[in-house]
Amino acid sequence: MNTDNSKGYQPGFRLAARFALREMRGGLRGFYVFIACIALGVAAIGGVASFSRGLTEGISAEGQAILGGDLSFSLVHRQANPEQLAHLQSIGDTSRISSLRAMARTQKAGNQTLVELKAVDDPYPLVGDFDLASGKELQSTITGRTDGLRNAVAEVALLARLGLNIGDKISVGKTTFNIADTIELEPDKLSSGMTVGPRLLISQAALADTGLIQPGSLVNYKYRVNIGWNVQEDQLQQIIDHTNELFPNAGWRIRSKLEAAPSLQRNIQRFAQFLTLIGITSLVVGGVGVANAVRSYMDTRREVIASFKCLGASGGFVFKVYLIQMMVLATIGIGIGMVLGALIPLAAMAALQSILPINAVQSVYPLQLLLGMAYGYLTALTFALWPLGRAHDIAPTVLFRDEVSTRNRYPKPLYIVSAAITLMLLAGLALVMAYDKSIAMIFIGACAGTYLLLLIVARLIMAAARRVPTVHSTELRLAITNIYRPGALTPSIVLSLGLGLSLLVALALIDGNLRRELNQAAQEQAPSFFFVDIQNHEKDAFQSFITEKTQGTDFNAVPMLRGNIVSLRNIPAADYPAPPEAEWILRGDRGITYSDSLPETSKITEGTWWPEDYSGEPLVSFADDNARELGLSIGDKVTINVLGRQISAKIANFRTVNWESMSINFVMVFSPNTFAGAPHTHLATVAWPGEATLQQELDLLKEVTQAFPTITSIRVKDAIAQVNELVGQLAWAIRGASSITLLASVLVLAGALAAGHQSRIYDAVILKTLGATRGRLIKAYVLEYLILGGTTAIFALFAGSLAAYFIITGVMDGTFALMPMTAVASIVGALVFTVGFGLLGTWRILGEKPAPVLRNL
């Protein structure tokens, strides 16, 4: 072989692959952590993406049943007119559903609750099966009577809440019903969105008897249409377009079976993105383990690499040999991760079957698994290139001579640039695949910043340990020396623990602040009750009643209508370029009101308020933050559809809105002349000057329901309790997912200990030979881990708190409190687990017998 590689034989990839595979005949020992780190991250990313895809396909597969037909036409306040109804019936079989919130009360005084009342007609359900617990048929049950009373069917939760049984009586509005059965399965429940009370289902004829339907009442009318044949997406769109052309001012919201539960789909995508980002974090943490494993392995191959170079191998050939080995190992880890990722949806469905509102389509999703594979290869390359590149230009004499090098060698610029490029590709992939690009960009920046800061922290800890004055305690002196000596575990421990603990602190503080803000707002700012559907003729009597029954309370009432935005700045709402954080304003219908004066809790930020006797062109005041998000300016036109009429108004001013107060707030407030003569109801709040007692609130709820049975009462604390429960469920899910990152930290710690295993054995044996006891050595190692763990924990508290502060104040527009006990509890729990794991490995090292080790020195 010609050793002049510049002119003679240049060994290629095939030969490098042969050498690489031959060297791997010894097995995978020393690379289990490498493989586990890659497998864990790939499984998390592929599994989450597959589960999300399965849920989304489940919604699509059951779209017709979820929606209740091929098409759904929704109206607020009013029913479709005869001409509109005739057109819908010409498309296919049609069913009408009326839904509203109402107060249900029992014969026992004071026993009442808010319910989601749903009235259906004879064709319901057009698609799917509505199952009752008894197995009886729905229509014959709800259209029948018992003891002269109309029948109703209810969710089990309603019976449990009011202490009822089947056959008991319940009153809604002006009508008393017999509970004839309980609901086992409601096929279209998911399309209703978030509910605030249990379901009570009655017939359309029974709804008319309740007296709840009045002009302006907040009732949602949905017309489901089942076309009766396998209609395709383009055909559905043609029907929708034709219907909009026939009735351009109908003001209805049209949905097809292809978007049966858009809100749920968006939430699935957002949650999947968050869990995917956590999976990427675990890969990044695992990347430290990859780098440790590669560096440790390369140290054991010094003599082999020296032999290669003495026989004429170039640095590039050596690099190729070991890069191929690392990619083979990465492939093994990725393969394991992809298998686990394919199994995760099955396990998740089995565990969450009773919680999830739909069944996910159980299948293997190659594209989602390939996404995990791409992340796995990029992570392996990113963290392996640096330690592999360092072997390129090291002279054979150095490789033979240096057992442990104290110099910080850098690879050639080619390898530094290559590592940087793969890192950018990893970040770019996370950004491209993200549902919310801005959140992903913030996350990537935070990860990169935290990683760099942790590197700096590790170097500072080592520098500080070098400068610590000599201490009298032998154990403490040994612990300090271990922190900065050549081959110290400090960088690995700080990086792995720091990222994992920072994430845990951030999640704990975000969860705690959300709960704190909800409960604080309920106690300090929020009213005790919202009262909905107060008719014009009831308003004065209701106000007098409240004033008489609750002395000293603050009563506030405003007109209430609902309408949907048709266009902004003459751009149709469907085509308006709204950012993701403002899309909700243009979706569905919005609560709106009118007023001759500025709301008490608001301040004008731009423009002027209209005079009290204003009678000119309709004007509107827009919430300042929302207007800025939508890019609106004073003088722009806003067109809304209310009660089937399109009304355009000019933006006269922007005003602040204190959404956190949970009081009466609207995005849009119109000048009074805008809705002159339009039927509407009123929305009212009641707030005690101090915190009301539970008994005061329950007494008022009972008296209002008895005196005004058609008015719906919403107790704010009940609504907040429901939101708190939801936040709690999400928090546990997120903590479960983030435990993957902590597990990756443990793996990295185990890998770091394994990498330093041999040198620790030598240290322990020499010290034991010189008279050190196992107790004194374990004390030294405990002190070392406590110093490193404590320092890393302090950084994690700072970094995690900073991340939580930014998310709470910058992304969620909330207020932040440090909550030190919450953060410290997360840190202590994680440290006990991880540092304890490290000490277990150290205890095993201290059990080595001196004689065999000394013979091999």
Image (cartoon, rainbow, N blue to C red):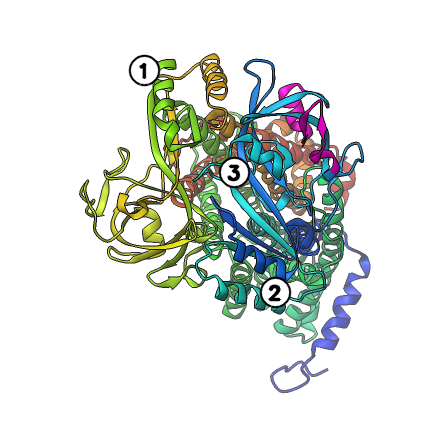
Where residue 66 sits in the image (x, y, percent)? 66, 49
Q: Do the residues labelled 1 and 2 touch (CB within 8 Å)?
A: no
The answer to whether one can see residue 480 in this image is no
Q: Which residue is drawn at 73% across and 38% down?
A: 138
Position of residue 828 relative to residue 34, above or below, is above
Q: Which residue is drawn at 80% across and 35% down?
A: 135
- In front: 799, or 535? 535
What is the three-letter code of the residue carrying label 2? Leu
Instruction: From the image, tell me which residue sits under label 2.
Output: 236
* Stretch of the chain drawn in magenta: 140-164
Tell me the quadrant of the picture where the N terminus can be found.
bottom right
Residue at mark 3 to residue at mark 2: CA–CA distance: 43 Å
Instruction: From the image, tell me which residue sits under label 1.
Output: 552
Residue at mark 1 to residue at mark 3: CA–CA distance: 41 Å
Instruction: From the image, tell me which residue sits under label 3.
Output: 507
Residue 176 is a magenta residue: no
